[in-house]
Each structure stands twice: as C-alpha cells, then as structure tokens.
Amino acid sequence: MWASGYSVVDPILGAGLPGLPPDTPSRSPRFGRRFLIAVVSLGILIGLGLRAWVLASPLGVLDADEAVVGLMARHALEGEFSAFFWGQTYGGSQEALLAAPVFAVVGSSALALKLVTLSLYALSAALVWAVGRRTVGEPAAVVGALLFWISPAYLVYWSTKALPTYGFGLASALVAVLLALRLERRDSRLDAAGLGFALGLGWWATPQVVLLTLPVLVWLAWRRPRVYRLARFAVPAFLVGAAPWFAWNALNAWASLDVEAVAGAGTTYGERLGDLFRYVLPTWLGLRVPFSLDWLAGAPLGTAAVVVVLAGLGLLFVRGTRGLAPLLFAAAAFPLLYAYSSYTYYVNEPRYLAMLAPVSALLLGWVATRHRMGLVLIPITLVLTLAGLVSMRRDGLYAPRGVPRNLSPLLSLLVREGSDRVLANYWLAYRISFESRERVIATSTGFVRYQPHDRLVRADAYPARVFLRGSRREAVLALGLRARGYRRFETDDLVVYARP
C-alpha cells in the first residue's frame, strides 16, 4: 500500500508530487546522446517505411469515407463550408479544410489527402514527446514518442486513413494536455487561453477529446485549484475554437446532442467495459489482429501478456511513481469514460483507443528506460506491428469485399459511354465522384452523404448503374434496365449498365 513513501492515491491525484520540469530525466541508466539520436533517426525512418508500405499495399486504398473528405476539401476551395462530415451531426471538417490548400497547390489526389492525415499524426508524435518531457522525463519521452510512431499495427494503419476528426482531434487534445501541464507549474493567461482554444477545436472535431483531456483537467484541479481562476481566459477561447459547432447547432435544434440510436444501444455499460478488456485492449496492444480478432501468438500467451500489462499498470499506481500522476489518472479514468458511449459496442477495430495512445506509449517508454534491457520493448512492439499489418493485409477484412482497388477502368468506361451520372453502392459512389474529379457524379443507392449530388443524379432520366459482380441487386434490376435500353458492360469485378 505504501511504497517509496507515497500512498496509492498519490500517483493518481498527484498530491504533493510536483511534475517533472522539462529537463528532468527519469530515474534510468544514462543513454548517450549519439545513441538516442541514432534510435530516434532509425525510429522515424521505420515509421515512415511502415506507412509507405501500407500506402502502397491494398491497405492504403482510398475508401468511400475518405473520398467524402476529399470531396469536402475540393468543395471548400469553391467556397462551400461544412461544419461537419457530410451526412452527420458530429465529426468536424478540419481535416478537409486542411487538405483544401494542399489540393490547391498539388491537385486533388488520394495520396495528397492521406499525407495531410499522416502529417497530423507526425505532429502528434512530436507532441507526445513534449508531454513526455513534463511527465516521464528524458529519455523516456523520446522512447514513448517512438513507440507511438511505430506501434501498434492498427494505429500505423489508421494514421494513413484520411478520415475526419481522429487525427486533428488527437493533436488538439495533446496540445490541451501540454498546456495543462504547463499551468500545473505556473499561472499563464496565454496558456489558459491556448488550452481553451485547443479544447474548443478538439470538441468541434470530436467529443472523444474528453477521453484524454477530462482526466488531466480533473488532475490539474486537484493539484492547483487556484489555476481555475484563469477560466475567464480559457472559456471564451473555448467558445471561439468551438464556434462552428455552436453556430451549426444553434441553427439546427442542437442536433449534435441528439445522438442517434445505433446497434450498440442494446448493449449495457458492463458489457462494453468487459469487451474493452476482452477484445479491444488486446487488439490495441498488438496481440490480436484488427478486424479478424485472431490472436497473433495464441490465446493463452496473448491473455497472459494482457494480464502482465495490467498488473504492471497496477504496480505503477501502488508505487506512487513521481511525475506519472496525470498519465496514470488518464489511464484509470479511460475505461470508465470509454464504456459510457454505446458506439463502443463495435470491437473489431480499436479506433476509440486512439486517444489513449499517448498515455500507453509514454508509460511503456518510462518502463523501457528504467533498465537498458527495457529497450527490448522497441523491437518487440515493432515485430508485433509488422505481424499485425501483414495479417491485416492477408485477411482482407479492412475493406468491403468485392470493391476493386483500382477504379480507373470503370471511370474510363463511364466517360467513354457518356455516363456522367451514376447510381452505385456507398463504397463505390463517392470514390467515383472523387477519383473522376467530379467529371462523373455518383450517389449512393443506400446511405446518402451529399444531398446536392443525390438530387442531381436522380434528376437524370437515365443514370448509369454500377454493381458489384454477382450482386443480388443487379439480378433484381437487370431485366428492367435492359428493357429501357441500357447496355451491359463488365470491368474487373464490376458490372456497368450504361445509359441508352
């Protein structure tokens, strides 16, 4: 219960434990400057190499959700602003807005779009290091940032997905945490305003920012209650950062607060909490393969590794380790906050653990640098990352089945046949619009993201139809389409009915 002179509550609440100043090393063996520079340089190159491999493989193929972000960026260049991801009342548009000027310079493409997201995660890696300097100290901060950059397999893959909210939301949350750590040491109106602004931007991007920021703010309130006198600077800045969220909701009956029912609404809090430790956490640690949930090294060994990790975390709580207080508080609060949302019923991929990535990376970095042999954690995590990525590619469960990787033959056929209005399933429609640079406008036969395009296509008397080969929908509609004079073509795994 008592170790190193501190009680079990000390590392959680930080009572009497001053945060480490930026230049304070953790209690670990000395690592030479040249050695650290070599490790950092190699780690950066490995992280870039992993992502280059993902982008060049089927794992890096643009999907429909990413294509929507690309379309939003292109429309932003034409003066069309959307507060949220098309078709949703949540999920800020910041990543699309960041991609817009990139498109203006280099043109719109899947690679340009993905590089914007990748850059946000690279920025987050630097912020993890900055947060680490004020919590775990050097060189643990360096190792933690490298672990964040090269693992787990899911985060490496996820950092190449140009999806809304996640990359920008994580970077915003880390900025807020860094400023909270600065405020724990001294009052600063500028830091308070910056913290509020970062929280506002993060809230607009995704409410998930509370998973990381709320525990740290509660810890700050415990450590320095007087710092909240600076709320008069933080709150207005928060309102400015979140202004698009508030403006849109004021005009739309606060629809963002009216969470739609999802399949997970039938699950209980306890079930979601249990699934976090049974499925999601092992997948995040690289012990299970995302989407398939297969154990990489078998269930007994994987389960034992999860138990060791959790036991190690518990030991850190008991020992009352100096400087880790905000990280441990965030780790303790995360499961309780995570299971609150019914959206976490989905366990095949650990996307909602992205906000925990900085905490887990820095805690592992601290452990790794306690002894020189601890650095073996880096090659172990790298092996797990490689094995996970290869397994994901082999399984092919990360993308809808039957959707071709390359749509160029389809787009050439549509343009040649003069079919510039298209009806297709969701996973094809928005890729067709984006990859054709809207020379061909497609809309979904299912969930519609963008109503103006949907109205445009459905106003056409003879829109082309695109089906996955062997689809039941084609079998139902084929006779009627032929009767109306449509011509049938096949390309790759797709069937096209071109306009008469």
Image (cartoon, rainbow, N blue to C red):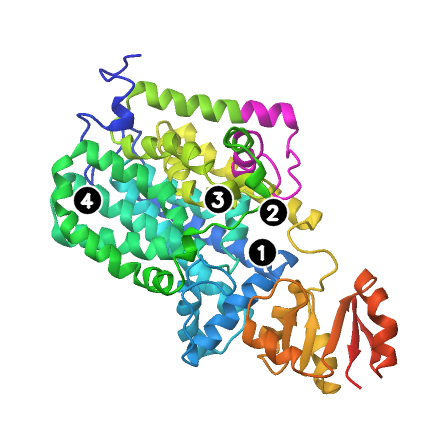
Determine the residue positioned at 57% across, 60% down. Answer: 55
Sequence order check, earlier mark of 2 and 4? 4
Name the quarter where the C terminus is drawn.
bottom right
Sequence order check, earlier mark of 1 and 4? 1
Give the residue type at disc 3. Tyr
Determine the residue positioned at 45% across, 21% down. Answer: 311
- Foreground disc of the pair 1, 3: 3
According to the picture, the residue beneath numbered tag 2 turns out to be 389
> How far, Cα to Cα, is label 3 from label 2?
19 Å
Sequence order check, earlier mark of 1 and 3? 1
Secondary element under disc 1, as helix, strand or loop, is helix
Tell me the magenta residue range. Answer: 277-305
Residue 163 shown in magenta: no
Give the residue type at disc 2. Leu
* 309, above or below 249, in the image: above
Residue 364: x and y, percent?
41, 33
* 370, above or below 416, in the image: above
Mark carried by residue 94? none
Residue 64 location, quadrant: bottom right
Q: Residues within 10 Å of mark 2 (few under 14, many from 20)?
A: many
Determine whether label 2 and label 4 are within 8 Å by CB. Answer: no
According to the picture, the residue beneath numbered tag 4 turns out to be 182
Determine the residue positioned at 41% across, 36% down. Answer: 337
Give the residue type at disc 1. Val
According to the picture, the residue beneath numbered tag 1 turns out to be 54
> How far, Cα to Cα, is label 2 from label 1?
8 Å
Position of 180 compared to 226: left or right? right
The extreme front residue here reads 253
Residue 248: x and y, percent?
37, 64
* 411, above or below 319, in the image: below
Determine the residue positioned at 56% across, 62% down. Answer: 65
According to the picture, the residue beneath numbered tag 3 turns out to be 352
